């Protein structure tokens, strides 16, 4: 092959009169390329394979389905970013040939949308190519893409460290991190902040940043509603006045801070403009569900489900609407529905179960769908099914402390009210507090633990579990003397218990230091 042709195929528009220097991939055969040095180069690349996006943190099938839905219906996010992310998900599933097809789609978008700067816009895609070929043991192809990246970096920045500082790469990284869930939100925020530092008024960067902070408002919430995202959302809407997707997040945040009337104006404006976007319909439905306009919410959710029938989010929202309608009837009948009311409650419970079950089937990591399904089974008297779902939830791996907190809380309630097992309820309420000591549920948890513990001590003053539970609760509340008293009583009954001994030592030391 003519050497000039080889080199200019990498840089068809940006370079003139190049001096050809053969790369490793052109000099060596695949068997001769040193795998260790290639791996060292791959680890320096900026792409999905080096952003520490862990397979264990997502449901791969739900992720793939979500990305495909967004490629079809969502115009906010760059299709280039989505195809790159889909390629990575395909690789995680072990489908490397499919991953290559996704990267080819990404290349077509680059060629069409970024013809004047194809090479610099290809860096993430080429990095993903290199990693996929590496995992396929096609080392010559992997090295070829590493060489292409190195040549671009040398040409543009005069550096061969395989990286360029580009805000579009930071933005793509932000979207990828955001997609992998709550554990990644802070890192996603950092990536978008870095992109915005370079281009403060870039419309897409502002959308990504605003949605990330919106997610963090809920993810890091402990009690009161957080409104950190209100300003970023308003700015994103001002920079993207025709974008319905970002407007619906602003509407939801306004509803959060009790500015529902202003939020509804945005929702009405959106629904007048958009009739076929399931991503807008789903959040508009959430707005109306939270407003207790359940029929309107269900109408929108059904429209969205026709377009994306496998959406775990939509099924979960449907279940929440049916559950809310059921609760309304039970409240109106003082929890004793009869006749038509009883038949309607049974029907709504069945509807809610079917949708929560579908949500779990579509997304095996959807913690709130598990607890809502288990609770609804319990509501319908199906205690064995409820127990099975709670056990599956308790066995979930790589979930956040907040999710563990929620599972133990709901399972504790199931044990208390449906299984009538105060001992098991106390255990799981304590586990909920030990996992996360500060949340909106904590006052409720400490109150119910005191109630149950004192009740059990009333007919058995030597109940070790209740004594230690009170020790833990009082310690959490800062009442060190009372905490120490109960831990001492528990420790006398169970002298070898390390938890009691450790807690007592800490408490006694704190008490001594106060005097």
Image (cartoon, rainbow, N blue to C red):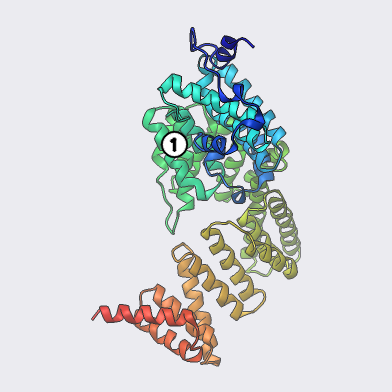
The quadrant holding residue 2 is top right
Give the residue displayed 54% in from the left and 34% down from the top: 245
Q: Position of residue 311 (x, y in %)?
A: 68, 43
Front residue of 413/149: it is 149
**What residue is disc 1 on?**
192
Q: Residue at x 50, y 40 (%)?
A: 249
Q: Nearer the viewer, residue 401 or 240?
A: 401
Where 183 sits versus 494, above or below?
above
x then y, percent, for residue 216: 46, 48
Residue 394 visible? The answer is yes
Q: Nearer the viewer, residue 486 or 283?
A: 486
Q: Residue at x 69, y 36 (%)?
A: 96
> Going 61% across and 41% down the picture, which residue do you hit?
282
- Classify residue 472 as left or right of residue 81: left
> Vertically, is 394 above or below 214?
below
Q: Residue extending furthest left?
A: 515
């Amino acid at each position: 092959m003519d050497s000039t042709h080889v080199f200019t195929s990498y840089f068809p528009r940006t370079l003139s009169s190049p001096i050809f220097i053969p790369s490793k991939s052109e000099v060596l055969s695949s068997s001769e390329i040193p795998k260790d040095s290639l791996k060292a180069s791959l680890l320096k690349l900026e792409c999905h394979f080096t952003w520490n996006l862990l397979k264990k943190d997502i449901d791969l099938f739900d992720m793939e389905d979500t990305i495909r839905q967004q490629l079809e219906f969502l115009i906010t996010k760059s299709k280039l970013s989505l195809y790159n992310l889909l390629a990575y998900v395909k690789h995680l599933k072990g489908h490397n040939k499919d991953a290559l097809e996704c990267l080819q789609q990404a290349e077509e978008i680059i060629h069409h949308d970024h013809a004047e700067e194809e090479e610099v816009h290809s860096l993430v895609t080429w990095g993903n190519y290199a990693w996929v070929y590496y995992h396929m043991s096609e080392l010559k192809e992997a090295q070829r893409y590493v060489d292409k990246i190195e040549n671009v970096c040398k040409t543009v920045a005069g550096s061969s460290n395989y990286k360029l500082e580009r805000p579009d790469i930071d933005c793509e990284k932000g979207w990828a991190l955001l997609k992998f869930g709550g554990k990644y939100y802070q890192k996603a925020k950092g990536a978008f902040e870095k992109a915005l530092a370079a281009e403060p008024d870039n419309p897409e960067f502002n959308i990504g940043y605003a949605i990330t902070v919106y997610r963090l408002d809920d993810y890091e919430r402990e009690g009161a509603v957080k409104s950190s995202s209100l300003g970023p959302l308003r700015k994103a809407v001002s920079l993207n006045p025709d974008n319905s997707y970002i407007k619906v997040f602003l509407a939801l945040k306004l509803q959060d801070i009790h500015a529902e009337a202003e939020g509804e104006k945005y929702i009405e404006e959106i629904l007048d403009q958009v009739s076929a976007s399931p991503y807008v319909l789903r959040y508009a439905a959430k707005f109306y569900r939270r407003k207790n306009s359940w029929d309107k919410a269900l109408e929108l959710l059904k429209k969205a489900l026709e377009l994306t029938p496998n959406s775990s989010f939509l099924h979960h929202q449907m279940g929440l609407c049916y559950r809310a309608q059921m609760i309304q009837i039970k409240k109106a009948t003082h929890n004793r529905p009869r006749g038509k009311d009883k038949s309607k409650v049974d029907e709504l419970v069945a509807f809610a179960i079917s949708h929560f079950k579908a949500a779990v089937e579509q997304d095996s990591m959807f913690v709130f769908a598990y607890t809502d399904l288990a609770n609804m089974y319990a509501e319908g008297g199906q205690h064995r099914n409820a127990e099975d779902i709670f056990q599956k939830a308790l066995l979930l791996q790589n979930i956040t402390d907040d999710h563990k907190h929620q599972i133990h809380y709901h399972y504790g309630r199931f044990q208390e009210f449906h299984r009538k097992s105060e001992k098991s309820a106390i255990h799981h309420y304590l586990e909920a507090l030990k996992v996360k000591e500060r949340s909106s549920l904590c006052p409720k948890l400490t109150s119910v633990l005191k109630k149950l513990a004192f009740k059990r001590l009333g007919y058995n003053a030597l109940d070790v579990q209740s004594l230690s539970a009170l020790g833990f609760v009082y310690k959490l509340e800062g009442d060190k003397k009372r905490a120490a008293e109960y831990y001492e009583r528990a420790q006398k009954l169970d002298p070898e218990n390390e938890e009691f001994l450790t807690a007592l030592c800490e408490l006694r030391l704190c008490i001594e230091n106060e005097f």
